[in-house]
Amino acid sequence: NASRLINYALPPSDLESDLVIVFDAESRSVPKEKKTAVFIEDAFRVLLSELVNAGFSFKVRGHKPGSVFIFVKASDAVVSFASYRSQIKDWLFGIRTSAPVAPVSQDKLDDNFSTAERLRLVYERLTNSEKDHGLGITPGQGDWVFVKSIFALHDPKFNVAWIERWSTKWILDDDELDIIRNTFGEKIALYFAFLQYYFARLLFPTVVGLLAFFFLPPYSPTFAIISCLWGCVFIESWKRREIELAVRWGVKGCSNLVTHRAAFIGESEREDPVTGDLVWYYPPWKRVLKEFTAIPTALAAGLILIGIQAVVFVIEIFLSEIYDGPLKQYLVFLPTALLATLVPTLTAFYNIIATGMTDWENHVTERTYDTSMTQKMFVLNFLTAYMGLFLTSYVYLPFGHLIAPNMDIITATMERFIGETASAKKFTINKFRLKQQYIYFTATAQLINFFVETLLPYIQRRAFKEAKKLQEKVTGTSEEIFKDKTEEASFLTRVRTEADFPDYVVGDDYREMVVQFGYLSLFATVWPLAPLFSFINNWVELRGDAVKICLDTKRPIPSKAETIGPWLDNLTFLTWLGSLTTSSLVSMFRASATERDCSYLVSARPWVLLSAVLLSEHAYFVARYLIGLVYDALDSTVVQKHRRLQYLNRQQTLNRSLTE
Amino acid sequence: NASRLINYALPPSDLESDLVIVFDAESRSVPKEKKTAVFIEDAFRVLLSELVNAGFSFKVRGHKPGSVFIFVKASDAVVSFASYRSQIKDWLFGIRTSAPVAPVSQDKLDDNFSTAERLRLVYERLTNSEKDHGLGITPGQGDWVFVKSIFALHDPKFNVAWIERWSTKWILDDDELDIIRNTFGEKIALYFAFLQYYFARLLFPTVVGLLAFFFLPPYSPTFAIISCLWGCVFIESWKRREIELAVRWGVKGCSNLVTHRAAFIGESEREDPVTGDLVWYYPPWKRVLKEFTAIPTALAAGLILIGIQAVVFVIEIFLSEIYDGPLKQYLVFLPTALLATLVPTLTAFYNIIATGMTDWENHVTERTYDTSMTQKMFVLNFLTAYMGLFLTSYVYLPFGHLIAPNMDIITATMERFIGETASAKKFTINKFRLKQQYIYFTATAQLINFFVETLLPYIQRRAFKEAKKLQEKVTGTSEEIFKDKTEEASFLTRVRTEADFPDYVVGDDYREMVVQFGYLSLFATVWPLAPLFSFINNWVELRGDAVKICLDTKRPIPSKAETIGPWLDNLTFLTWLGSLTTSSLVSMFRASATERDCSYLVSARPWVLLSAVLLSEHAYFVARYLIGLVYDALDSTVVQKHRRLQYLNRQQTLNRSLTE
């Protein structure tokens, strides 16, 4: 893997920078009549003078026609001052346990000052609003329409070492996570911590699943119960782990720190109830009311998606198990093709609506905005991921036999529409359909997904490069419009490549893992080997995500995070739903799966089924409550240490005020 | 009411004291052979010298044969020092927002220093362990077997004013609660705050209930849903109210303050993970395991109680609706008599076991001990209170018709056992039984209970006094063995009376209210006037509890509290269970209650019933989640003010450390 990190272009020392600003005169968000040379030059000059005034040094280099890079570097004094101010804020909001210490030297930073901290401070200095002590350079917004993006450059040396180390290590310990934290910030580190923790905890259901596969009958209640309990314990223990990491990284309570979103529009100016500063205010009850409108919207989108899935499902059943007419070999791909086009279209459309609604909700902070958006999208992710399995479990298998007696009508209808040539097979329910589908989702699809996510972009890029080279050869023209200095050339090529990378969106990776967790907690009873495949997948996923960050995305801008936030709620939701699905699947299919000559497929009567579900759900609630009790009773030593520090610092403060 | 407060005996100035220690040489917990005059005198001397060394002044007066009162008064200097130390502790544990300020004068307390604070500090100084800066005088334990009790004297002037004020006021505002807090401490004040809040919030279901009674059909789903939602909103809003009160009274976070129980036995000495002091340690996992043994115990007690209730229930049905033989007029009281003897016996027995188990769990703090004990007892309280209604709803009414076809056998069996004279009526189900029972519990029983709780002790006391006077007249002897000085006589009589009062147990009053809340949330659909009766009852209850504290119990020793703790969980549990019972009652009995000639009593089929319950329960979860969301979104201004204070103080500290 490491050999793929070929772009070993280090910056010539005078281009060393913290961040790169892309100034794009061709910006599409500016009306054409405004794009006069004078106007653009003015904007450029304002930007540069802002930078100079704020104590940044910079170099400008060409990017592509109409666009330049501004390599921005903050002096140590600027960073050191920003760091002190950030520490003060942390202390004021109770995130730091110890009072901030003024920097010893204002001109030189500590040697162990982390890259992530430096990048975060510089980025915030550039993009925060004036109120939050920044320059307010918000790409694409307000006065900064020509600023296309502000991004950080990868550190190729670090990346190579990172990938090399992780490819050879089996287990990633806390030191590794600390390294990620010091380079990419707490938010990214928390994702890797979560993934590593989840991966390690998967070992248990993997082993139990293997045992169940070989020694227990299918749809075994024992495996179902162990699997459910594991889910509860996993979530509860992750909550603790999360707090411990927040303490370790000194970000406990950082969710209370409010940085105003640039897009937030207050109704009136008011005193902040905590800090007493004048801030823009928007009545929370209005936002709550707006948030409630998301419920009907999500319901509508959900219904449409369910409709699509149901129609496709019917077509699929029809084609694979009834239809036997002409073009069958091509028609069987129709359902997949329909899903592959309709679902992403709907998702994209819903995304636009959801974004619009979340914008309209007018959130004060990025954090609440992200949470609101995540939860809106999760409704659709959930339906997309599991609807097929739900339809098979609760519609096709229990009610499929109702089709058989109506075969005559179906055949007749078919003949009328498709003509005499269509012929109908005798319809039989495919009782293995649920398992086949589930194996596809948990084994095959994960492999495909991994390929799409990691290898495909790489291949695309290679192919694109080759194609470009070929084109240049054929046409004889070269896109190199800037004459780079020879010592800068390879470096600038790298920067141009990185500038075209997409941002790394950590939420997408969380979604993938949470959806996977859902497959396990909802349907593991169908095929006990699923945890094994997820376990293997996640080992690769951990490394794959690292490679993805290094090769396929911009370097993430560090930011603080103390919790995986809304994803925790989604995980809990999935374990709860698992208590319903698992119990119903077991009580419906156990008899027909174990007894050899079972004439019926679904064995339980409605009220038995309902009772089983009721019982299982309440057993789940009790179990979760008890597990919570145990975790409450057993104090975490890391958290205790944190409280100890708080106590000691308070004592120190007290002693100082007593001796005064 | 106020005229009943006759004991207007103020102490002669030299007996003015903070607390009264009862030194009882006849103590039953001391083996007889040890009760030598020398031994007792030694113990008395040790106690007095401890008091003197700690800066207390005292006077000794006679109590009754073999027992004396020690009137203890702390100097202002002692209180002032203790107060400063308590403030420091509060600051170290983050309860105070502002750094503690050393007292201006060490010899004289502030004029607005509250009585409650003074009493609490003096009591803690006497009873806390040495580690917690006390003298460790724990009544009846260790070296202090002769110390029978330490109690505070009522302030008759305050009490008279209190009762007079509350008898004439309709609404108790926060100022009234502050007065309670300043006199009896936060724990008692929080109870009155809860009761007042609950009373005020009951107005809504009272009005809705009245409307439902006159305009809606019986078992109306509308009323059931409104009633359920009200419960959720009430609990959520009380959580906020509780926090606001804690902020107002400066006790937010006081649950983190650990005072070791005297009875706690550590296994080993260890550093406290927070303060770093050496403390006794008991592994929490052992306690958790012990706590889990409470589950089978409670189950067993529950089963026995259910058994008793079921047997009594059967006897009652038999006697009231089947039996028509001799002695019927006396036998109908048999069930009541059985319940009245068996249930308290079982409760008392279970109480002993529960106390033993909770002692065995070896809790570090009174708070966790109380919680554990409360929850153990609540299982039984719950079953005692509601089992009768449950049996009627889910056994008698749905399955009663199964008895009719078997009447021959029952009659035959009766005749064999009771003889020819017994005759059986034709059995018909009493379809009003549930309503009759419910009206008894929510209207009649509350009245009886109020009488038993408030008036009975008063009458008993009066009767006892008269009897004593009469006895003295008849026998000519008087119990006055101490020749009180004339100016002290009436005061000492009052002290002797108060010394015999029981302690005020705030948990009993919480239990009463929570059980009442349960009647409403579980069964209000049976009779929509129930909230009205509870509303009226609670207006009286508020005043009645005040009178009870003044006249029938010792003055409560003030202590801090920021939450009603386990009762909140119990309230939540009852609303949840209410979502199950209400939906099932509505779907079972609505048809037979509304249609005039309905041949069946229970109309719903099992799977319809199960579906209704499932649906209602999940609607409840969603509603609770959404209500929680709304409350989270709307920040409390009081809590904001608290955060503001925290922020300002941190800023101040910062500024000070910057200017150093």
Image (cartoon, coloured by chain):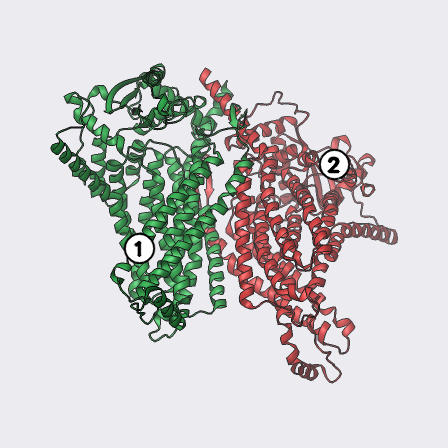
Chain colours: A red, B green
Left or right relative to B16: residue A119: right
Q: Quadrant of the C terminus of chain A?
A: top left
Front position in the image: B197 or B121: B121
Q: Amino acid at mark 1?
A: Thr
Q: Secondary structure at mark 2?
A: loop
Q: Residue at x 60, y 29 (%)?
A: A83
Q: Report the front residue among B312 and A18.
A: B312
Q: Quadrant of residue A255?
A: top right
Judged from the image, the secondary structure of the residue bearing numbered disc 1 is: helix
Per the model, the C-alpha gap separating discs 1 and 2 is 83 Å
Res A80 visible: yes
Disc 1: CA contacts within 10 A as few (<14), some (14-19) or many (>=20): some
Could you tell me residue A69's position as x and y percent? 71, 40
Q: Nearer the viewer, mark 1 or mark 2?
A: 1
Residue at image location 64% in from the left, 33% down from the top: A117
Tell whether B421 sits left or right of B225: left
Q: Can residue A298 be seen here?
A: no
Residue B529 is tagged as: none
Horizontal relation, residue A3 to residue B283: left or right: right
Q: Amino acid at mark 2?
A: Asp
| Coordinates of residue B223 in the picture (x, y in percent) | 36, 61
Q: Is residue B193 above or below residue B105?
A: below
Name the residue tied to disc 1: B336
The residue where tag 2 is placed is A155
Q: Disc 2 sits on a residue from what chain?
A: A
Viewer-proximal residue among A565 and A388 = A388
Quadrant, the N terminus of chain A: top right
Q: Is residue B383 above or below residue A62?
A: below
Q: Position of residue B234 (x, y in %)?
A: 38, 50
